[in-house]
Amino acid sequence: MAQLWGGRFVGDTDELVYRFNASITFDKKLFEQDIEGSIAHVVMLEKQGILSCEEKDAIVKGLVGIRKDVQEGRLAITDQYEDIHSFVEAVLTERIGEAGKKLHTGRSRNDQVALDMKLYIRHKVVETGEHLEALLKTILSIMEDHLATYMPGFTHLQKAQPTTLAHHMGAYFEMFKRDVLRLWDIYKRMNYCPLGSGAFAGTTYPLDRSYTASLMGFEGPTLNSMDSVADRDYVIEFLSALSTVMMHLSRFSEEIIIWNSNEYQFVEIDDGFSTGSSIMPQKKNPDIAELVRGKTGRVYGALVSVLTTMKGLPLAYNKDMQEDKEVTFDAVETVGNCLALFEGMLRTMRFNARAMEESAMKGFTNATDAADYLVNKGVPFRDAHGMIGRLVLYCLDKKCGIDALTLEELKAISPVFEEDIFEAVGLKACVEKRLTTGAPGSEAMKEAIKINREFLANIWIKGCDDLEMAKGRGTRGEGK
Ligand code: ARG
C-alpha cells in the first residue's frame, strides 16, 4: 500500500477499506493526462519562483522518463498505489529523490483529478468528432449516389409517401451533424483549466493559473476554485451528447434491421458485417446493428449514473465523484467502437434499388399526390382528401393501385380527372415535384448535399475555432 497521507494516522488501513477506496485499477487510464498536468504545473511553479530551475528540470525529466517507461512497457502501474496521482508522485520521488516531493506544491488531488478528467474528455470529444466525420462522409456519398433511388417513406411504420434513399440518408446526416455541433459546443464550454484551485479554496502560493492554462491549450483558468473541484458538468454534458449519438445510431440500426429482413430486402449487409446461426444454416443475421442498438442502453446508463451520483453532493469535492470514471470510460469506448463499426457496415452495405422502388409503388404512397392533383384543378383540399379516400377503398376492393384504374373509373369519383392524372401519380413525378427546401426532389436534395459538403470541408473550423489545434494536441501535445 502506497499512500500520500500517512502522517496523521497511527493504525493501518484495513485491507478491504484500502481496496474499496483505491481507484488505481481504473484511473490508470488517466496516466498521460496526469503527467501532462504535472509538467505544466511545475513549469509554472518555476516561472513563479516557487521551484528552482534545477528542481523543475529534474521533475520534468523524471516525469517524461516515467511516461516513456510506462508507454514502452518497462514500468507497470500496479495496484500497490492508491491512485494514478500517488503512483506518479511515488515513482518520481523514488527516481529523483527530494525534488520529487515538491511536485505537489500548491496542488490537491481534487484539482488534479478534475484536470485529468477534463484533459481526457477534451481529447475524447475531438476523437468522437473524428468518428462522426467519417460516418458523415459515408452517408454523404450514399446520398450522392442515390438521388433517384425511390423508396417508400413511412409514418407509424406504414407506407406514407414516396421519397428517395438520398433523402432518407440525409435525415441521418442532419442528426449526426447536430451531434458534431454539440461536441464543439461542449468543447468550448469546458475548455477552462481547474488546476490551481487546490483542495477548493485556491492556495497561498503565487500561482499563475492563466499560464498553466495556456500551457495545456485551455482558454483560461476556471473562475471559482470551489466550483472547479466540484464540477463534473463536462462529464455529464459529454455523456449526454454520447447518449444522443447512440440514440441516433440505434434508430438507424433499427431501420437497417428492418430493411435487411426477408420481408423487406431493401439492403443486404455485407458478409464481413453479418453473423450466422449455430443451428439454422440459411441465417445471416444483422448482429452488428442489433448490438449497436443494444449498447445504447449502457451509454444511457452511464449518463444516468453520473447524474445520480452528483445530485446530492454538497460542495466541494466528495469521494462519490470517483464514481464518474468507470462508467465514463466504458461509455466512451462503447461509442467509439459503435461509430467505427457502424460506419464500416454502412459503407459496405448493398442497396436493393429495385426492391425499394417496387415497394414504393405499392401501398398508395401516391395518394397525397392524387389529392394534390385535384386541388390543382380547383377542388378544395378537404373534398379532394375524401374523394381519394373513397378511391383507395375502391382500389383495395379491386386489389390494384390508383394508376391501374381507367379514366372512366376515376371520373366516376370526380369528373375533374383527366388523362394527365397518370403522369401526376407516377412515382418519379411524386418525388421530383417535391422541391421545398429539405424535400426529396433531386433539385432540392442537390442543394442540401452542396451545403453539407461544405459543412464537412469546414468541420474543424465551423464549430470551434481552436479545434484545429485541439485535433493535433489530444492529451499528448504539451511538455514532450
Ligand atoms: N480518486 C479520486 C477521484 O477519482 C481522486 C481525488 C481524490 N481526492 C481526495 N481528496 N481523496 O475522484
Image (spheres, grey):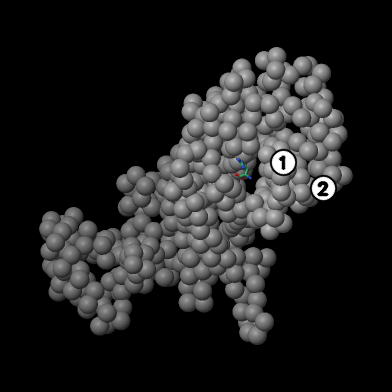
Name the spot of residue 85 as percent of width and height, x first. 70, 39
Q: Residue at x 76, y 38 (%)?
A: 88
Q: Is residue 261 left or right of residue 84?
A: left
**Whether residue 225 is situated above or below residue 256 in the rendered picture:** above
- For the view shown, which residue lies furthest in the front direction? 10
Q: Residue at x 63, y 37 (%)?
A: 109
- Answer with the quadrant where ligand 1 appears in the image: top right
According to the picture, the residue beneath numbered tag 2 turns out to be 76
Instruction: Count residues near mark 1 (Cα–Cα under 10 Å), then give few for <14, some for 14-19, many for 20+.
Output: few
Q: Residue at x 49, y 26 (%)?
A: 223
Q: Amino acid at mark 2?
A: Ala
Is residue 174 or residue 241 the one in the foreground?
241
Dot 1 lies on which element?
helix
Q: Amino acid at mark 1?
A: Gly
Q: Residue at x 78, y 16 (%)?
A: 53
Instruction: Count residues near mark 2 (Cα–Cα under 10 Å), then give few for <14, some for 14-19, many for 20+.
Output: few
